[in-house]
Image: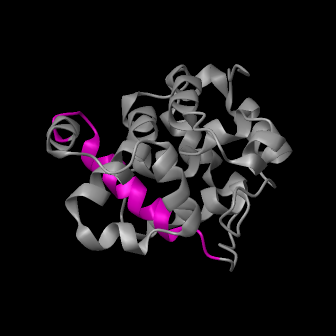
Amino acid sequence: MIHLSSLTDIAHLYATHGALNYGEGVTQMEHALQCAALAEANGGAPSLIAASLLHDIGHLFEKEDEVAAFTVDHRHQDTGARALAGLFGDAVWQPVALHVAAKRYLCFKEETYLRALSHASRHSLALQGGAFNTAEAQSFESMCYWRDAVALRRFDDMGKREDLSHRAFEDFTPLLRSLLIDAAKT
């Protein structure tokens, strides 16, 4: 795994791998920007906006052929959360770690949610273990940041439009900088 030690590393990772498409009709970069813009437009806290922007960063560590094949769950949520934990507090990286669990939770909790998922999200759901059962849902609801993870998941589902967000990664740099654990890591 590539180690992230600064915002410059994050920006470089998105500049280098953000043009990859993972089956949703949008690039990783556009998806990230749409999710962050949705969180912002819905009055999300700065930490939720940052988590929405960075939630799929774990995919950017995967090899391009692995992303294209899409036959194994590489647990991008864990990879991303670990990469972000050294830079940001829990309120940013925990929702990233939980956003896949939030999808599984919503599939259990809301009968219409599964039917509304994109084809790629339904495919990844199967690889990720399917909908939660009652015990898994209750366990999820006991976790810190589970509500933020659910909100992030909804932005994730909506942030797959083919039209552009008209935002740039740099638009969110001041917000990300304000959330760094150590201000020297810009």
Split into 4 quadrants, where in the image is the N terminus?
A: top right
Residue 52 in view: no
- Looking at the image, which residue is at 57% across and 33% down? 80
Q: In the image shown, does 6 or 122 lie closer to the viewer?
A: 122
Kindly tell me whether residue 21 is visible in this rendering: yes
User: In this rendering, is residue 88 above or below 130?
Assistant: above
Tally the numbered discs: 0
Q: Magenta residues, as a range? A: 141-161
Is-magenta flag for residue 157?
A: yes
Is residue 168 shown left or right of residue 154?
right
Residue 49 x %, y %: 47, 52
Q: Tell me residue 56's x, y (percent).
A: 59, 45
Question: What colouring style does the render use?
Answer: one colour
Observer-nearest residue: 37 or 104?
104
Along the viewing direction, whichever of 45 and 58 lies nearer the viewer: 58
User: Which residue appears at 72% of the width and 40% of the height?
Assistant: 60
Which residue does the image show at 47% across and 65% down from the upper left? 157
Q: Which quadrant holds residue 92?
A: top left
Residue 163 image position (x, y, % from top left): 68, 80
Which image quadrant is residue 43 in? bottom left
Name which quarter of the figure residue 19 lies in: bottom right
Residue drawn at 83 percent across, 42 percent down: 65
In which quadrant of the rendered image does the C terminus lie? top right
Indicate yes or no whether the magenta region holds residue 148. Answer: yes
Query: Overall secondary structure of the magenta stretch?
Result: helix
Residue at far bottom of view: 163
Residue 185 at x, y = what percent?
65, 23
- Answer above or below: position of 67 versus 180: below
